[in-house]
């Protein structure tokens, strides 16, 4: 079976925003930063490049690749819930390691399980039942913005407004109790703001007094005043809507992110599952990252496909996709693979259940 090299680019039809758990704003009030990919140019100079993680693309594509199988099972079995929780978790995220034991003898059935489950074969799993860890055939690389030192845009930085103060006529919607609560909120927010400013000043005064080695009585007096102000903030309960929104960084609209997939030694059904998953991804809006409600995440894509086998590279065709429009295939090999994967589903040759010590059904 050949290895397929799929090279091309993702185009940001909207800004792309996402975050990683280990990256935080430098200080409170700063926007959520994007990660940076260090790339060396032809002269060996390191460049900081913005990118979309391969793992993020892999996870999205995996879930969409499973959808045609799940939809067929729903229609075939006339049920909304054709798979167990564990089977769905295996299909969508590759399982989560639990207490189940790996059975070395079950490995003799691994080829059959992978043949019957192209999603598992392509994307692998951290916990595939008795098979344990399974390495997927799909390598999904980072999509890197090809503009060296490209700068992110900052979106979403603003302050929430108070609808009642912005449009006073809305106060007519409140009864007497509501008007009283509104007045208490406004007054409390103002008092809290002043109190917090005073607390900050007292903390600075205490630090300065200690630095100047003033008497314990003087420091104790300042500390008592500080504790009284802290208690005041506890007694004034208010939820101000006038909160600052620091926003987030995003790869700008129109950016071109160079990208590559490598599908190692795949057959037509596995390649077709990949293509049909890309089609599902595009039909559902082709979103990557977060902040969709803020108009972020839509991408389009253009790729060429070549096979590598026996030291020879052969061009097979190309494909492109656009949000909500699906995928367009160019090349007989791509059409054949897509049709083979569709027939594989329609003929019920697949098994998405969690692997056990028996052969795939």
Image (spheres, rainbow, N blue to C red):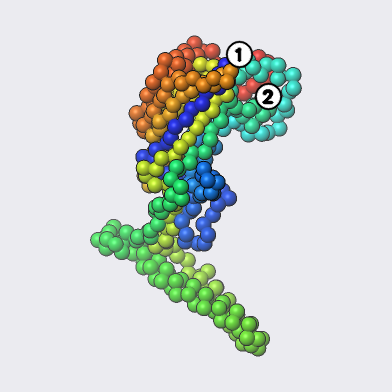
Q: Quadrant of residue 167 in the image?
A: bottom left
- Left or right of 99 in this view: 311: left
Mark 1 near mark 2, Cβ–Cβ under 8 Å? no
Residue 219 location (% of width, % of height): 62, 84
**Residue located at (44% from left, 71% from top):** 193
Q: Residue furthest left?
A: 169
- Of the 4 image quadrants, the one containing the C terminus is top right
Q: Residue furthest right?
A: 104
Q: Tell me the CA gap for discs 1 and 2.
A: 16 Å
Q: Mark 2 points at which residue?
A: 131
Residue 60 location (% of width, % of height): 49, 34
Q: Nearer the viewer, residue 330 or 110?
A: 330
**Residue located at (73% from left, 23% from top):** 103
Q: Quadrant of residue 238 in the image?
A: bottom left
**Residue located at (29% from left, 62% from top):** 166
- The answer to whether residue 242 is above or below residue 137 is below
Within 10 Å of the Cα at label 1, are there few (<14), some (14-19), or many (20+) other Cα atoms? few
Nearer the observer: mark 1 or 2; the answer is 2
**Residue located at (58% from left, 50% from top):** 22
Q: Is residue 19 visible?
A: no
Residue 11 location (% of width, % of height): 39, 38
- The answer to whether residue 73 is above or below residue 192 is above
- Left or right of 271 in this view: 358: right
- The answer to whether residue 25 is above or below residue 346 is below
Q: Can residue 124 be seen in this view?
A: yes
Residue 111 location (% of width, % of height): 64, 17
- Of the 4 image quadrants, the one containing the N terminus is top right
Q: Name the residue under label 1.
A: 361
């Amino acid at each position: 079976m050949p290895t397929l090299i799929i090279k091309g680019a993702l185009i940001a039809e909207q800004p792309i925003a996402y975050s990683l758990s280990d990256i935080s704003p430098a200080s409170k009030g700063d926007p959520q930063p994007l990660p940076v990919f260090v790339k060396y140019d032809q002269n060996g100079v390191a460049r900081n490049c913005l990118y979309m993680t391969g793992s993020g693309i892999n996870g999205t594509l995996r879930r969409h690749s499973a959808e045609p199988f799940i939809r067929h099972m729903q229609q075939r079995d006339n049920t909304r819930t054709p798979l167990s929780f564990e089977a769905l978790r295996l299909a969508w995220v590759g399982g989560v390691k639990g207490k189940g034991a790996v059975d070395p003898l079950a490995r003799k059935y691994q080829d059959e399980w992978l043949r019957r489950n192209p999603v598992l074969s392509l994307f692998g799993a951290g916990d595939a039942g008795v098979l344990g860890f399974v390495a997927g055939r799909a390598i999904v690389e980072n999509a890197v913005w090809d503009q060296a030192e490209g700068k992110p845009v900052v979106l979403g930085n603003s302050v929430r407004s108070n609808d009642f103060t912005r449009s006073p006529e809305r106060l007519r919607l409140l009864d007497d109790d509501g008007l009283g609560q509104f007045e208490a909120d406004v007054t409390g927010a103002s008092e809290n703001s002043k109190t917090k400013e005073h607390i900050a000043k007292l903390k600075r005064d205490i630090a300065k007094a200690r630095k100047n080695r003033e008497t314990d009585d003087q420091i104790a007096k300042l500390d008592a005043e500080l504790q009284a102000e802290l208690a005041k903030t506890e007694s004034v309960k208010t939820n101000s809507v006038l909160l600052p929104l620091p926003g987030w960084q995003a790869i700008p609209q129109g950016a071109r992110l160079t990208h590559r997939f490598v599908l190692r030694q795949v057959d037509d059904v596995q390649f077709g599952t990949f293509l049909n998953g890309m089609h599902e991804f595009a039909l559902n809006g082709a979103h990557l990252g977060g902040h969709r409600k803020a108009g972020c995440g839509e991408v389009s894509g253009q790729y060429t496909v070549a096979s590598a086998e026996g030291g020879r590279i052969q061009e097979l065709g190309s494909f492109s996709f656009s949000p909500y429009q699906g995928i367009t295939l160019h090349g007989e090999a791509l059409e054949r693979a897509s049709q083979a994967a569709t027939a594989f589903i329609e003929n019920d040759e697949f098994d998405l259940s969690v692997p056990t010590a028996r052969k795939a059904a």
